Structure formats: C-alpha cells, structure tokens
Image (tube, rainbow, N blue to C red):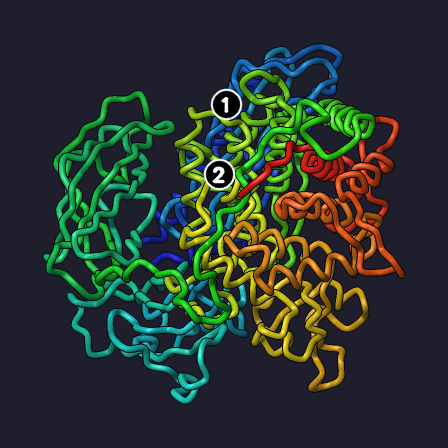
C-alpha cells in the first residue's frame, strides 16, 4: 500500500477527501513549482502521477546531483524537527547558482537561493522538517532550480510521526486475510462498536496501560496485570451504549511511559465524521498531561487559506480555556495559527473536548487559488483536543542518605575546571622537550583536522551509526564529532570568535541542533545525550559569557533526560540516575560519564541533585563488594567498572572474552561481568566529579584496578577496541586525581611512573605523517582518522594542562 493510501485509510468516513488532498498536496505543490520553472511543454499536465514522472525526468536532466536526495528518518515523535544534510554536486565545468527553492509546505526550511556551487565542486545543504501534533507518515520536499542549466533537483525528507506507543485493530483485509488498522473501524464494520484493540511499544520498552478515555483499562486477559509492565496489551472496549451525540472521536489511552502518557486511536463511526469549515492540516491536538492552571501553546496549519482569517478561539469544554494568539502567512496558501489552551485551576481528570475556531473564509471544498480575490463568509469550525489534568508531581529529590549506593556525606568539590593547555613547560610536571613535542603534536593534529573539515563546517559529515541499544542509525554523528573537535581547538586557544575553522564548526552545530532556538540535539533521538554533552563541553570551552544562555539551554536539556523518580525509577532501580543513548535510551556508564564531563566543564556543583543521582548509577557499575547488584556479588570484586548495571548488567569485555555481553554464556548461577579499562577510568573520573574524596573506598578500589592494569598500549580488557576513546578518558581521569605518578602494581619492585610522560609518548608515537591518528580496528568508528585524531588531540591536551595544586 502506498503512503497516500495508508493516509487515506487512517481517516474517518467523510474525511477521505480532505485526508487524501492533505497528503497529495505536497506532491502537487512540488510538481507545480517545478513545472513553473521548466519548459512549458509540461504545463498542461494535471495528474500527480504524470507530474511525478516529469519531476524524475527533470532530475535526470539536471547536472546538479544530490547525495542523498531522499532520507527516511524512520519513527519520530510529534512536534519535533527532523534534519539532514545533503551534498549538492556540480558536475559541470562552470559554477551554477540556485535561482529558485520551492518547498512543499511551511514545515520545511532550506536557505539555498543565491548560493553558488563552484565548477566540479560541492556544497552542503541542511534541510529540516517540523512535524505537527498529527501522527502518520510525513513527507516534505524542496525542488531547486539553477540558472543556466536544465532540469531541477528534488530533496525529500520522510518520517513516520508516532509516539513510542501506538494502538491498532485487527480487521478483515480486502481480498481476504487481515490487516492492522491504526483506528477503530466501526463505520465499515458496525460490529466493531464493541471489540478489542492492541496497544504496543514501538521500541520494545515495557509499559502499563492505565486508563482508556479516563476509565480504568479493561484487559482482555486480566491476569496479565499482575505480571508487571509489558511490551503490548490487548484491551477490550464497548461503545454500544453511547448515544450518537456523545460518541467520542478517539480512544485516548493513558500509559505510564513519560514519553507516551497519552496516545489515541481514531474511532471511525457514522457519528464521528469530521467535515471542518477550515482546512486544518490535522484532526486533533494531544495536550498531554497538564497541571491545573498550566497553559499549552500549539500551532495549527490551515491549508487552502486564501481569504481565511481567524478572529477567536473558544473552548467547548468548561474545564479548559482557549485563547487565539496570532496567525501568520505560510507557504503558498497556508496560514499558521497559534492557540493557547489553559487548564482551569479547579479542573482535573481526562478531557476529550473541542475548540471552536471563529473567523471568515471561503468554502474549504471550493478553495480560491492564491492571488485571486476570495469570496469569504463568516465561518466556525470545531477542532478536537484532549489531555489529562492532574497535579504536577513534586520535584524529584536527591537519593536519601543510606540509599544504595550511598552518596557522600559531604561532596568534595573537585579540582577547578581547566579548559586551556599550558603555555610553558614549567606549568606541567614534564620535561621541556617532551612538553614541546606534545604541543607540536597537538598543532599537527589540529592542522590535519582543518584539512578534513567538511564543506558544511563539520567533521564526518553525512556519517551515521547505530548506537549500542538503538534499533536504527542516527545521522547526528557529525554533530557529536564536530562538538568534540570544537573543544579540541578551543583548549589549544583556537576559539570560534577568532578562528575561522572553529567558527564554521560552531555554525554547523547551531544549524544541526537548533542551538539557541528549538534545541533538539538529535531529531532521531539515537545520539541525543551524546550530542548534547559534547556540545555543552564545546560551549564551555569557548569561555565566552555571551554563550551563557546557550550553555543553560543545553544544561537544562541534559537534566531533563536523566532517569529518576519522574520516570518511575526510584533510587533502588538499576536505571536510577543514569543516562543512555537517545533522549531516553537504556542508561550506561559511557553516556553518564560524558554528561558528568559536560556538567563539570560547565561549572555545575558536585552537590547538584542531577550529579548526585548520576553518582548512584555510577556506583552500581563498579565491581566491588559493596555493590549489591547480583552480577557484582558473584564477580571478581576487583574495583573496576563495567558498561552498565541496567537490566542485569552488561560488559563489552565479557563479550570479547566469549562470555556474552551480559555474561549469558557462563554456567548458570555463576554469571558475572568483567571490568575493563575505558569504563574503569570513566567510573573513577565520574566519582571524583561527583564529589567523592580520594580516600573513599570506591575511589581507592578503582585506582588499585588502574595500578594493576596500568598502561596506554591498549584498552585493558578490549585490546585495540576503543583505544583512542580509552586514551582520552584515561588522561582526563588521571588529571582529575591530581596525581603526578602512578605506581604499577605488577613487577617485583615497580617504580612510580609519570603518567603524563607515558601517555604523551604513547600518543605522539602513533601519530601518522599527515598529522592524523587512526585505529586499525574499526569498532566504534575509530578506524576513521577524523574521530581518532580528535580523541588523540584531546588526550594530549589533558596531559599538558597546567597543574592545579589544591582542591
């Protein structure tokens, strides 16, 4: 089934015309824009299929090629912004300039007109698409034409807008068999006025169903309620006794998932037809959970809006107040209307109501073409809204004293933040010759990165990767890597205000994260925490007071995505306090230590509640007798750290040893996890950043593990895997200890080693002739010299930062 057919079947009877037109219109607009710019021989073509064929023909004619021309972002949440960057390649021997950019809808942004692509050259083009509150497939397109060359370029961005939880009903399919409808079909199948639906998690994370339309959920199998959260639930409903005038247009399903508290299923029924007098681009707005007195502002697009003016908005539900804010022109004949909805102070419970939009406009079924005078008349149109009004939960408290694992009685402030390398060898416990060699190595590495910078200002532009627990690849890799590079340049004194390479990189980051505006570090959510953490470090490294608001914006985002009581994880949960990939991924030590790095660089105090919650998670990751996690109690208790304690624990070192990442290949009853180098240094550093004293038994145990496995030739427990990540983490961790030397625990009479000397010698010795570094093992993208070089430069910079004498 095509995307248009799927969209057409997802709306109710009486909606099919508007639903199909809403889906067809972006294609028609894009094709119309193209046909206005290409030879008139095609101007008489009217049907969309032929227009699409003409568009494909013109793309083949155009000597400017897009790589990629189309991106499917997969599942994204409503009201988010999806971004990708395309490379436009000019295959001619003359420069070409964009003369027209025709987006298919207001939701799409692309600034290209007037930009020139050099002969045989390329240009990076960021394109974005904002999703509305409506769920379903969303497609945005931009058609570009260039002066002096034939044809056109089409850039297309597609996403499936959905909450992480959705519902479906199994119904007969035309021609036999069954199909899953994302709605209750009681129009074509009147017997479905009562029946069953399935509600399931798209990402496999378990949840509970709490209510349906404000009443307790009725399970098909009530016994499953005692089994705890599940990935899917079968629910029973009965609408047969509801009079026609009170038939709800949606089943509103309440879950316990913070990112999907309310989801809906359209009820297609003869009493729920929608025939709006304004051509809204969606049929309802999910207000989510609101506190009494809280206001939610949302934006609606009205299509075919020539002559439309909205004068007021009223709520038809007495528990809500509505207020029209403003309207503005959009693309072609669209307008954007902003509305505020406020829960009344004494209101509570589930609300499934309507807003009445009052104004003037033409008949939506007989729209007036743009540019022609509109015969407008007074009109009213109702629009469905739903939400739940409940008192806000109290702000989560820091773990109570004595909660496992224990927080420090008094947090010790770590060493002051140092974000610049030393200017002179006398500031560092390192001989002058070695210091100068390390500084020169840093500058050679940065020189290589200057040559490797992409045309858009980033590094690894166009790259994607699938994070450990994510189901699809994220295209936010360039944002994370670029932020690390910006920090590397800044620590060597090359800040964005003075250095063109750094300035271009910062501009890339603003474009791809919405920094300073609608901040979204990774619209696909796969690397959200990673991008936000590295970005906060990059901003802090600028040491520019003018960036304070942006620092606060990113810092606030990181506070929001921590797993704590607000998401149903009490201090005794093995997720509590941690951070994971994506905006809400399974927590792990790698992401958590990166957040603590960022908060430390941004000057956040060790006794900050977010830092202390993170400490609880970090402590659960340690192989130590005081850790009550089952894998730790059965383990070596060697003081080292594993990848994550969540869900029973995981270790990449156990995986490398053939025991399984979760130790699942070990004999029953003996499952334990292996400690390894990069995570042990991450754990040690995180404990110090969270205020544990060097004398704390957990800190001392971690340092003993490091003494036992001291060295920089490999990542202990993983060999060459993640070697450069290890070097950077180790350097930063050892700097945090304020120790000048490490005395290895092996050997008959081990002598103290100056860790700075050893690390500098190891890293400088692996630098290649062009100034880069590269890991022969590809894992975690370290086979790419851009990423490996950034890690190596950052590691060297930690080794040659000036010593801070006291805490």
Counting labels gives 2
Residue 254 spot, x, y in % from top left: 33, 67
Where, by quadrant of the figure, is residue 570 drawn?
Answer: bottom left
> Which residue reaches farthest bottom?
223
Residue at horizontal 44 percent and vertical 80 percent from the top: 228
Q: Which of the pair 633/575 is nearer the observer?
A: 633
- At x 61%, y 32%, the residue is 487
- Residue 597 - label: none
In this rendering, the label closer to the viewer, 1 or 2: 2
Residue 587 x/y as whole percent: 55, 60
Q: Is 316 on the left-hand or right-hand side of 561?
A: left
Q: Nearer the viewer, residue 45 or 295?
A: 295
Q: In the visual, does 446 lie left or right of 749?
A: left
Dot 1 lies on which element? Answer: loop
Q: Is residue 689 above or below residue 632?
A: above
Question: What residue sits right under mark 1 in the picture?
Answer: 111
Dividing the image into 4 quarters, which one contains the N terminus? bottom right
Would you say 660 lies left or right of 377 here?
right
- Name which residue lies at 84% across and 48% down: 713
Using a 10 Å C-alpha cutoff, classify the residue at mark 1 as few (fewer than 14 neighbours), some (14 to 19) or many (20 or more): few
Label 2 element class: loop
Question: Which label sits on residue 602?
Answer: 2
Q: Is residue 618 left or right of residue 358?
A: right
- Residue 194, given in percent of the width and then of the height, sits at 31, 79
Determine crowd level at label 2: few under 14, some 14-19, many 20+ residues with C-alpha closer than 10 A. many
């Amino acid at each position: 089934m095509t995307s248009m057919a799927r969209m057409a079947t997802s709306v109710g009877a009486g909606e099919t015309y508007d639903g199909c037109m809403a889906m067809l219109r972006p294609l028609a607009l894009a094709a119309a824009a193209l046909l206005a710019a290409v030879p008139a021989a095609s101007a008489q073509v009217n049907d969309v299929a032929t227009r699409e064929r003409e568009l494909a023909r013109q793309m083949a004619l155009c000597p400017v090629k897009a790589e990629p021309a189309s991106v499917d972002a997969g599942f994204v949440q409503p009201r988010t912004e999806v971004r990708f960057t395309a490379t436009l390649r000019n295959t001619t021997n003359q420069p070409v300039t964009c003369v027209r950019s025709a987006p298919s809808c207001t939701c799409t942004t692309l600034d290209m007109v007037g930009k020139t692509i050099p002969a045989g050259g390329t240009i990076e083009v960021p394109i974005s698409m904002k999703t509305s509150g409506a769920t379903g497939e969303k497609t945005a397109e931009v058609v570009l034409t260039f002066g002096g060359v034939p044809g056109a370029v089409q850039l297309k961005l597609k996403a499936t807008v959905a909450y992480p939880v959705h519902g479906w009903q199994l119904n007969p399919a035309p021609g036999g068999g069954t199909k899953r409808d994302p709605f209750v079909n009681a129009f074509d199948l009147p017997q479905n006025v009562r029946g069953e639906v399935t509600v399931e998690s798209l990402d496999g994370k378990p949840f509970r169903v709490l209510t349906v339309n404000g009443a307790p959920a009725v399970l098909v199998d009530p016994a499953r309620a005692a089994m705890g959260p599940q990935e899917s639930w079968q629910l029973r409903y009965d609408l047969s006794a509801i009079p026609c005038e009170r038939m709800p247009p949606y089943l509103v399903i309440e879950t316990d998932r913070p990112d999907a508290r309310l989801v809906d299923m359209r009820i297609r029924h003869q009493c729920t037809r929608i025939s709006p007098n304004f051509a809204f681009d969606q049929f309802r707005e999910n207000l989510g959970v609101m506190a009494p007195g809280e206001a939610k502002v949302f934006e609606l697009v009205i299509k075919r809006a020539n002559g439309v003016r909205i004068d007021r908005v009223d709520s038809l539900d007495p528990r809500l107040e509505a207020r029209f804010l403003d309207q503005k022109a959009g693309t072609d004949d669209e307008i954007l209307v902003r509305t505020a909805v406020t829960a009344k102070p004494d209101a509570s419970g589930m609300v499934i109501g309507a807003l009445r939009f009052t104004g003037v406009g033409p008949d939506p079924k007989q729209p007036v073409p743009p540019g022609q005078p509109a015969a407008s008349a007074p009109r009213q149109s109702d629009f469905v809204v739903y939400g739940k009004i409940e008192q806000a939960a109290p702000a989560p408290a820091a773990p109570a004293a004595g909660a496992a694992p224990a927080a420090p009685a008094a947090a010790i402030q770590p060493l002051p933040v140092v974000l610049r390398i030393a200017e002179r060898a006398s500031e560092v416990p390192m001989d002058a010759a070695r210091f100068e060699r390390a500084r020169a190595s840093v500058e050679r590495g940065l020189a290589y990165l200057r040559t490797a910078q992409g045309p858009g200002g980033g590094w690894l532009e166009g790259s994607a990767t699938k994070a450990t627990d994510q189901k699809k690849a994220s295209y936010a890799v360039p944002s994370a890597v670029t932020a690390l590079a910006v920090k590397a340049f800044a620590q060597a004194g090359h800040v964005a205000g003075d250095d063109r390479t750094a300035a271009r990189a910062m501009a890339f980051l603003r474009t791809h994260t919405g920094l300073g505006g609608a901040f979204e570090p990774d619209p696909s959510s796969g690397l959200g925490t990673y991008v936000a953490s590295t970005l906060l470090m990059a901003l802090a490294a600028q040491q520019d007071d003018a960036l304070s608001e942006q620092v606060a914006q990113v810092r606030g985002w990181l506070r929001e995505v921590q797993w704590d009581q607000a998401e149903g994880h009490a201090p005794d949960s093995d997720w509590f306090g941690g951070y994971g990939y994506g905006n809400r991924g399974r927590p792990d030590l790698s992401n958590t230590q990166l957040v603590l790095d960022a908060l430390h660089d941004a000057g956040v105090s060790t006794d900050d509640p977010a830092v202390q919650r993170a400490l609880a998670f970090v402590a659960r990751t340690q192989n130590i007798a005081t850790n009550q996690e089952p894998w730790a109690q059965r383990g070596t208790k060697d003081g080292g750290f594993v990848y994550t304690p969540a869900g029973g624990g995981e270790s990449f070192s156990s995986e490398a040893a053939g025991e399984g990442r979760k130790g699942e290949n070990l004999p029953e009853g003996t499952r334990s996890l292996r400690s390894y180098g990069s995570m042990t240094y991450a754990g040690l550093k995180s404990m110090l950043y969270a205020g544990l004293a060097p004398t704390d038994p957990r800190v001392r145990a971690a340092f003993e593990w490091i003494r036992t496995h001291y060295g920089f030739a490999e990542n202990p427990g993983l060999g060459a895997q993640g070697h450069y990540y290890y070097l950077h983490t180790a350097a930063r961790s050892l700097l945090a200890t304020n120790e000048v030397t490490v005395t290895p625990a092996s050997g008959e009479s081990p002598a103290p080693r100056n860790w700075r000397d050893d690390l500098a010698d190891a890293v400088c010795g692996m630098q290649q002739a062009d100034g880069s570094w590269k890991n022969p093992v590809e894992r975690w993208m370290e086979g790419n010299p851009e990423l490996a070089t950034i890690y190596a430069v950052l590691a060297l910079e930690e080794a040659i930062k000036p010593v801070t004498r006291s805490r």
